[in-house]
Structure formats: C-alpha cells, structure tokens
Image: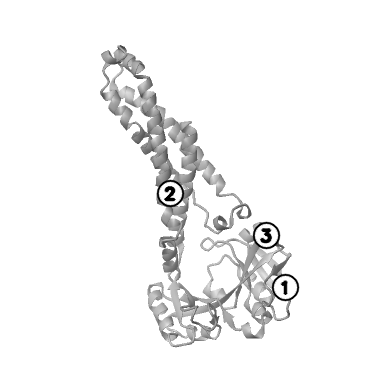
C-alpha cells in the first residue's frame, strides 16, 4: 500500500517538477533580440487588438531594428467543430524576423511562392492527421471571407519540426489571407515580430518603437521575447507558479501516510526489536533496518511514478482536455530524476523520525514483559 501511494504521489511530483523544468528551459532559450509589438489599448483602438500593417514601415526605420515581420492569426476548425486550428499568416519579412524557426530556405521560398500553401509543424500534423500534399480546409465564421465562403482552402506544402520554444504552428501566406478578407478588414495585423541587431539594446529599442507610435491612432506595447516569457511564467495565473506548491502538497500528504504506517508497524513489533537487541543488534542496525523498510518502497515508487509521468507526457494532444493540451509538456530529464530520488530518500528519512525516537528509548525488559 505504501508503494502504491508513493507511486501515485511521485507521478504527480514528476509531472510538476518536469513542468517547472520546462518553464525554466523556455526562459533560458528565449531571445532578447526578438520583440513582439501589439496594440497597447485594444478596447480604445478603432481596430481593437489589430494594428494597421502600415506601421511596419515606421517600425523598420527605428534605430536598432534589423527586420520586422507581420503576422495575422486565422482561427477556425478542421472537419470537426471540436478540432480547432490556427493558421499564422506571415509576410516575407518574417523570414528574417523569425529566422530561428526550424524551416529551411527552400521551404520559405515554397511558402511565399504558393499563395494558399501552409507549412504544418509535427504537432498539428499529428493532431489533425495532415501530411504533405493534403488539402487543408479551415472552417471560419460567416463574414470572414469577401466571397462569402465558409472555408479557406489551404494546401500542405511540407510537415516541418515543431519549434523548441513556441511549440507547434501552421504558417500561411499573409497576402493570401489579407486579399481574401472583406475590403474593410484588409490591411490589419495581429502584431509584428521585430528582430534587433543588439540584444543588449532590446529594451531601448522597445521604448523607441512605443515612443514613436505613442500619438498614433493605435499606440503599441513592445516586449522582448524573454521578458514576455518571464512575465508569463511568473504571472499569478501561471501554472508554473503552482508547480512547486502542488508537488509539495502531494509529498506532504504521502509523508503523513508513510509516517503513520511505519510508526504503527514499529509499535506492533516492539517485542521483535527487543529480541533483536537482546541478541546483540545495536540501535544503529535496527534503525538501518527500519530505514531500509521505508526507503525501498519509496525509491521503487518514485522510479515507477516518474516512469508513469514520462509516459503521460507522450499522450497525444488530441486525447487531452483543451486546457491541458495548450500547456508545454513536462521535461523529465536526468536532473528531474535526481530530484525525485533525493526527495524519495528525504521522505523516507522524515517518515522514520517518530519510530527512530521510539527505538532509541526502547526498554528491552519492558518490551519483553509486554509492558
């Protein structure tokens, strides 16, 4: 029973520690030389959260900027109302502004040479069942297209790797999406991705961009990628801020269970321990026996629980609830395994605190007499 309880607890613990490691990795791998530009006051702006594409040229002239890419998110469903999908429509400048994407120069050329083409990363390709050469009809709400059609006909040009930082994506052609929208909705973007020449000047460049557009109809807020990830991870509503407390709560509950079980076990075997001490066993040996009795199921449960956690991270996203499918997957590395093993040993040590006190005060005469 102790082993089963420990296994369940360390499955949760492994997932939480692995998720925390994932967030740390995301922050470390994020870049300061990439900026994200969005509308500062969406509610007060005439276009809401959208920005005029014409701002791209003004941003490109700001000192320190090396490239400015435009992106527009087109949301819809694929074959099933529950299968949501998003196409990120980008312009040619995004090739330089988002050059870290695992996309080859030939694939970029193919994307911009094919108006209705899309590059689908491995994640959505597996979730939606798409492969190279497939037609990808994206159903959108009425009024999204100028011709009144209810779907967008995309064609899968290639299946590319997921981005190590941002995860899965579907890239499309901004010109095709913008030209297909109603006339009054054209010329707008969700935001701009900006490449900066010097990462050390990223914050200064962000202030220059926002300062230059402060008096426009759509003031902007510009944030470096790394600062964006730090804010997301440390936010009060972020899952990352809760991984530690959740993991600690699980270990505390299992500590109470194990400590109570081993204390009862030692109480019921007081006479046996007295006999062992009479035969010449020292207190240190008895304590080592009790510790081994707890450490073996703790370590075994921790290893099996971590293995289950690793298996759960491989569950395809389509089988997970929507809220969980959007989270980054926990990283179960050797460092996480070392944390798990160390915590299992600490759990075993803490669990024998009460039995240890009882064994040190053991009176052989009283125990053998049944008192």
Counting residues from the N terminus, which is met first, the one under dot 3 or under dot 2?
Answer: 3
Discs 2, 1 touching: Cβ within 8 Å: no
What residue is rendered at 54% in x and 42% in y? Answer: 308
Circle count: 3
Check disc 2 and report the residue beneath it.
246
Q: Is residue 309 left or right of residue 82?
A: left
Check disc 3 and report the residue beneath it.
128
Q: Secondary structure at mark 2?
A: helix
What residue is rendered at 49% in x and 87% in y? Answer: 217
Return the x and y of residue 20 as percentages of the image width and height. 44, 53
**In this orientation, which residue lies closer to the viewer: 125 or 293?**
293
Asked if residue 114 shows in the view, the reply is: no
Q: Is residue 190 above or below residue 317?
A: below
Check disc 1 and report the residue beneath it.
150
| Mark 1 residue crowding within 10 angstroms, few (<14) / some (14–19) / many (20+) | some
Q: Is residue 152 left or right of residue 90?
A: right
Q: Secondary structure at mark 1?
A: loop
Separation of disc 2 and disc 1 at Cα? 44 Å
**In this orientation, which residue lies closer to the viewer: 357 or 268?**
268
**In this orientation, which residue lies closer to the viewer: 157 or 278?**
278
Counting residues from the N terminus, which is met first, the one under dot 2 or under dot 1?
Answer: 1
**In this orientation, which residue lies closer to the viewer: 344 or 83?**
83
Which quadrant would residue 167 be assigned to in this image? bottom right
* Front: mark 3 or 1: 1
């Amino acid at each position: 029973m102790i082993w089963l309880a420990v296994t369940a607890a360390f499955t949760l613990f492994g997932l939480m520690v692995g998720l925390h490691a994932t967030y740390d990795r995301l922050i470390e791998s994020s870049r300061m030389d990439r900026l994200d530009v969005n509308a500062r006051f969406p509610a007060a702006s005439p276009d809401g959260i959208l920005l005029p594409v014409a701002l791209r040229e003004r941003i490109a002239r700001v000192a320190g900027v090396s490239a400015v890419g435009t992106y527009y998110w087109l949301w819809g469903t694929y074959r099933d109302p529950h299968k949501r999908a998003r196409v990120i429509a980008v312009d040619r400048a995004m090739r330089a502004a988002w050059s870290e994407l695992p996309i080859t120069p030939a694939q970029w050329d193919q994307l911009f040479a094919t108006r209705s083409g899309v590059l689908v990363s491995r994640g959505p390709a597996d979730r939606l069942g798409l492969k190279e050469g497939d037609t990808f009809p994206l159903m959108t709400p009425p009024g999204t297209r100028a011709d009144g059609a209810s779907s967008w006909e995309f064609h899968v040009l290639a299946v590319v790797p997921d981005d190590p930082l941002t995860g899965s994506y579907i890239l499309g052609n901004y010109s095709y999406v913008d030209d297909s929208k109603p006339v009054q909705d054209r010329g707008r973007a969700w935001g701009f991705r900006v490449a900066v020449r010097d990462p050390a000047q990223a914050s200064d460049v962000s202030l220059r961009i926002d300062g230059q557009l402060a008096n426009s109809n759509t003031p902007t807020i510009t944030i470096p990628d790394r600062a964006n990830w730090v804010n997301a991870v440390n936010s009060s509503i972020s899952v990352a801020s809760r991984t530690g407390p959740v993991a600690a709560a699980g270990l505390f509950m299992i500590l109470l269970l194990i400590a109570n079980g081993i204390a009862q076990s030692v109480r019921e075997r007081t006479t046996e321990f007295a006999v062992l001490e009479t035969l010449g066993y020292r207190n240190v040996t008895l304590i080592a026996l009790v510790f081994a009795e707890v450490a073996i199921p703790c370590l075994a449960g921790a290893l099996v629980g971590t293995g289950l956690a690793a298996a759960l991270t491989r569950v395809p996203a389509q089988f997970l609830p929507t809220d969980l499918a959007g989270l980054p997957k926990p990283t179960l590395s050797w460092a996480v395994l070392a944390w798990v093993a160390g915590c299992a040993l600490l759990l075993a040590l803490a669990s024998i605190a009460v039995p240890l006190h009882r064994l040190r005060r053991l009176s052989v005469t009283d125990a053998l007499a049944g008192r």
